[in-house]
Each structure stands twice: as C-alpha cells, then as structure tokens.
Amino acid sequence: MNNSATTRAITKIALEYNGNDKGTAEMVASNYLLSDTAEGQFNEMKTVAERNTKVKKWALTGYISQPDEIGRKLKDEEFKQIAMEAFAKVGVKDRNQYRLDIHNSTKHKHIHFVVNRIDISGKCTVKAHDIGRRFGEAVREVCKEKGLLTDIEIGIQKKAEMLKNLSECLKTIDNFDELILKMKKKGFEIQLSTNVKDGISGMRIVMEKDKNHQTERIYKAGYKLSEISNQLKISEIKSLFEIKQAIREARKNADNLKEFRKNLQQKGFSVKIHYKGDCKAGQINEIQDLWINKVDSNQDKNGFFFRKNVGFSLSAIDSNLGDALKSLNQNSVINDASSHLKSETNESLIEIAGGLLGDLLNPTYVSQDDDELWKKKRKLRR
C-alpha cells in the first residue's frame, strides 16, 4: 500500500479536507473529539496540543492508499484496522485524539488521517524523527501480518514487468519515438526528460492503469529508469539506437561481411565476430553472433545489453538484423581470424539479463544495523 506520514502544525483546513472529498468522505474512526464540525474538532485538538508547549508540529497527518493489486476487496472496517494497527506501532495510544476518513472519489480508495501527537494528559507519544520511514515500515508490517502485499513487494513486481517489456521493445525498435509508441501498446507511458548538455537525459515509466490525475499532487506514479534497473541506463539505450542506425546504413552498401565491417569501421565502430566452433582461415565459417562497439565509447562497465571490452551482441539487441547480417557470410572466405570472438570468452546475454533481473527481484533495502556495519567496514578499508 502507498502511504505517507508527516508531522506539522495544522489549521482547520486539514480537517475540512479530510471530511469532504467532494462530499463523499466517510469518517470511519475518531477519538476524544466531541464536535461534529471540522472547526470544532480543530479547536479541541489545538486546546490539547497547547498542553505541551515544547512541541510545535503537534499533528501527525498523512494517508494510506489501497492499490489496484489489492483492489476494493477490503472492507472499510478492515482498511481502518490497518491504519489503527500502524498507528499503534508509531506511538499512537488510546488517549490521543484522531480522525480517520476514507476517500472514494479517486481511482484508488485511500484513508486520510489527522492525529494529535499530544495525548489528553499533555504527553507527546509520537516521535517526529524519521516518521515517514517508520510509518511506512509499520504499514508494511501490518500488511504482512494480514497476508497483504506491501508497497515494496508491489513495486518489485511492477519494476520487473516494466524491465521485461522495455527490454523486449528495445530489441524491435530504433529510436525513442518508436519506443514510446511500442510501450504505449503494451500499457505503459514513457516520459522522457531532457537537458541542454545531453539531450534526452532520463526516463520514467508509468503503467497506464496506475495513472490517477486526481492524486498527482500527492504522489507521482511510475518509476525512474534508475529505480527500475541499476544496469540499464539512458546512455546505454542511446548507444544501442546509435549502433542500430549505423548497422542499417553500413548494411545498405555491403554485399559481404568484409565490406560491412569496413563500412562500420569508417563510422568509428569495431566488429567482433563469434563463429560457431573454431574459426578456420581459408574457408567459410558459420556466424553465431556479432558484437559491435563504438571505438571511442566511454562505457567501461557491463550494462544490461552492453558487455565490457566487447560491445553489444547483435542477436540480443535485434535478432532480425542479426539474421540479415549472417547472410553476408554465405560467400565470405575468412583469411584473418583476428577479429574472431572465442567461444570460451562469450557469455550468453540471456544469462546476463536473467541474472540482473534476479537481482532486481530482490529488495534493495537493508536493516539499519546492517547498513551501519557495512559503513564501518568501508571506512576501515580506506
């Protein structure tokens, strides 16, 4: 479940918003509040908050949003119970004032809350430090206890689906315009960001079913490319498109493999050939794959498609192009085996991508204790 929580000094507007939702809000819980109006309830909360003059941001406010993956199968009482149990985990007691309202007017049913951190005896029971993270963990704990998917688990599934569809599309298109159209047909919106220096500099992917224009101010749907994969970067996608374009142009004016390689070399690209079995000079050798790289490429680490010191596997980035280029080999007698990529050094890109996808499916967060331990170890190594 998506969730958010923050501490702040509120006005009566916060309670008015909670209790309105275009006239459809439904109050499902309140505590130590006698008034029926937002203004009256605010005054009651403010009076209690003033019993502790040390706390300025006396209200805990936020929401819990129920995603489509859970659907509207949760009854309001069950939804309220999730919020109440999460409150208890961050310090809300039975002597704290609060009001909970379920909003149904938007695509995703969600529950808004206003809690007084100061209980009726004047004690602050909810610590402000790191409340957003702590509340999120509390909601996840409750969801796990009830057998519901957490926002992290849902996010992992969505990111894996996005990466799968993105990588499939990249194998069949040659530019960003085609990528946008292809992904849209699969139910995804591609949002590109640009800057003066790099041109296209970033990407965000949004599932069409997750778009909710009514709650865009609360949270932004989708994920940045860097959140989806730490291996596939926008620079690699741009290089992939550049190589595909160069290959198509070199293919137009080549009747054999030698001419094709020469045309690419003139454009600043290297070509490594992976033959089936051992490459023998003086005879025709069957091509298994071609690895192409830009000579002046500054990419020095393995990417999702890119392999360090070798480049891009043509059969992986575009099987149709790979099959077309293999036909150039039919009448090519190999006299120089120096550009042959030996089988023992070749690693299947399917295995590479599979491994990366496996890493993606594992949560990337660690406990605070483990994180501190690793920080200390890194510091000692310096």
Image (cartoon, helix red, strand yellow):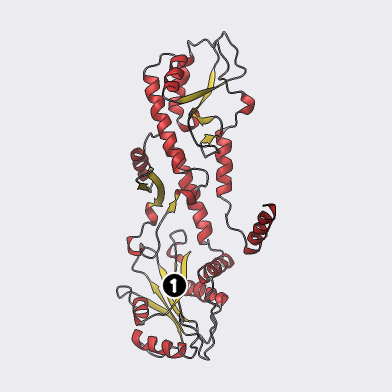
Give the residue number, with chain letter if any, for mark 1.
62
Q: Is 164 on the left-hand or right-hand side of 105?
A: right
Type of the residue with mark 1: Gly
> Outermost residue, top direction?
282
* Whole-percent x, y for residue 252 in the image: 36, 19
Q: Residue at x 53, y 67 (%)?
A: 133
Q: Is residue 171 visible?
A: no
Q: Mark 1 falls on what kind of element?
A: strand
Q: Quadrant of residue 168?
A: top left
Q: How many marks?
A: 1
| Closest to the observer, 315 or 117 | 117
> Outermost residue, left direction?
22
* Whole-percent x, y for residue 241 in the image: 41, 34
Q: Residue at x 50, y 90 (%)?
A: 120
| Closest to the observer, 24 or 125 | 125
Q: Quadrant of residue 105?
A: bottom left
Q: Quadrant of residue 125?
A: bottom right
Q: Is 233 on the left-hand or right-hand side of 344?
A: left
Location of residue 308 with respect to 120 vertically, above or below: above
Q: Residue at x 54, y 17 (%)?
A: 286
* Whole-percent x, y for residue 314 in the image: 48, 28
Q: Residue at x 53, y 68 (%)?
A: 139
* Whole-percent x, y for residue 122 in the image: 52, 90
**Label 1 crowd bin: few (<14), some (14–19), many (20+), radius 10 Å:** some
| Closest to the observer, 261 or 61 | 261
| Closest to the observer, 331 or 153 | 331
